[in-house]
Every structure is written in structure tokens, then in C-alpha cells.
Image: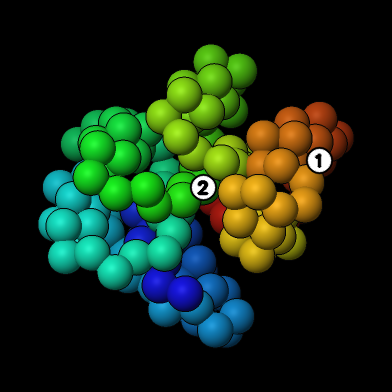
């Protein structure tokens, strides 16, 4: 599986790149919407994992734009955790909305299960938001 990772925080991106590579995924990173658009135009991605707050805009606008030409499944991985953010992600087409710091087992489950498998990503994200203390993971 080839993943397009859109994350502007270098330490978080490096941690995700290592984790996903260790799990056998091929990952291409973009730090901005502009870079993500350029990578996506080349095609060949099976999944988008996208932060929402990026230097040049919001991640949900990227997915809305990409959905005009391709049906790439997408996971939002973000510090934007308000109900309005989750709803905006759902409307844009993200199948999961996971909070930072990220429970890495939830991320891997969301990737493996895909848009139609197991516990739905928005239910996972709600469970993560309701937990008293998030497990160690990625910095927002």
C-alpha cells in the first residue's frame, strides 16, 4: 500500500514514516497542500493520511479537491478535535478522524480496516476523545 502522508510537523512526520515503513507501507510525505497536490497529481496512492492545519490551508480542502478526480480513502490525523472539525472531515470524505497525540494502534487499525471495516473511524475518534489521558504518541 502506498500512502500519501500530509504532515507539516517534521518530528511527527518522521515518527509516522518510521512506524508505517516498519509495518510494510510505502509512504510519501508532503508538508504543505501544494506539495500534496503535486504528489497526488502523479497518482498511485492507496490512502491519504492528512493533518488538518497546514501552512497553506486546511486538509479537508485537499480531500475535497482530490475527490473531484479520484476516490482516495482518507484519514484525518490532527489536533483539531472539536465536533465541528470532525463534522467537516466527515463531509469532506475522511473515513476516520484521529486525534493527536495519536494512539498508534488506532491509526494502524484504521489503515488496516479501511473505510468499511471494523470499528468506524469516527467512532474510534470519539472513543479516543473520551479517554481520560491519551496514550503517548505524536505531538500535535
Q: Examine the rendered structure and indicate whether residue 103 appears above or below residue 130.
A: below
Residue pushed farthest right?
132
Which numbered marker is on residue 121?
none
Query: Total of numbered circles in the picture?
Result: 2
Q: Examine the rendered structure and indicate whether residue 43 appears above or below residue 128.
A: below
Observer-nearest residue: 140 or 26? 26
How packed mark 1 is, by other alpha carbons closer than 10 Å (few <14, some 14-19, many 20 or more), is few
Q: Position of residue 40 (x, y in %)?
A: 23, 57
For this view, does 92 lie left or right of residue 122?
Answer: left
Residue drawn at point x = 68 percent, y = 59 percent: 113
Mark yes or no: residue 53 visible. Answer: no
Q: Secondary structure at mark 1?
A: loop
Residue identified by numbered label 2:
75
For this view, does 128 lie left or right of residue 61?
Answer: right
Residue drawn at point x = 60 percent, y = 80 percent: 23
Asked if marks 1 and 2 touch (Cβ < 8 Å), the reply is no
For this view, does 39 lie left or right of residue 117?
Answer: left
How packed mark 2 is, by other alpha carbons closer than 10 Å (few <14, some 14-19, many 20 or more), is many
- Picture quadrant where residue 39 is located: bottom left
Q: Examine the rendered structure and indicate whether residue 110 appears above or below residue 92.
A: below
Q: Secondary structure at mark 2?
A: strand
Query: Mark 1 or mark 2: which comes first in sequence?
Result: 2
Observer-nearest residue: 109 or 132? 109
- Chosen colour scheme: rainbow
Q: Position of residue 120 (x, y in %)?
A: 71, 42
Residue drawn at point x = 85 percent, y = 35 percent: 132
Q: Distance between the Cα atoms at labels 1 and 2?
A: 22 Å
Residue identified by numbered label 1:
133
Q: Position of residue 127 (x, y in %)?
A: 80, 36
Amino acid at each position: 500500500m502506498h500512502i500519501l502522508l500530509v504532515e507539516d510537523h517534521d518530528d511527527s512526520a518522521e515518527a509516522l514514516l518510521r512506524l508505517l515503513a516498519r509495518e510494510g507501507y510505502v509512504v510519501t510525505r508532503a508538508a504543505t497542500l501544494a506539495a500534496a497536490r503535486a504528489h497526488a497529481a502523479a497518482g498511485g496512492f492507496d490512502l491519504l493520511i492528512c493533518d488538518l492545519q497546514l501552512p497553506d490551508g486546511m486538509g479537508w480542502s485537499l480531500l475535497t479537491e482530490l475527490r473531484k478526480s479520484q476516490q482516495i480513502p482518507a484519514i484525518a490525523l490532527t489536533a483539531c478535535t472539536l465536533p465541528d472539525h470532525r463534522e467537516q472531515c466527515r463531509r469532506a470524505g475522511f473515513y476516520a478522524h484521529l486525534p493527536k497525540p495519536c494512539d498508534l494502534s488506532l491509526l494502524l487499525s484504521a489503515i488496516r480496516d479501511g473505510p468499511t471495516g471494523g470499528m468506524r473511524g469516527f467512532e474510534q475518534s470519539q472513543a479516543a476523545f473520551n479517554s481520560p489521558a491519551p496514550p503517548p504518541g505524536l505531538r500535535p
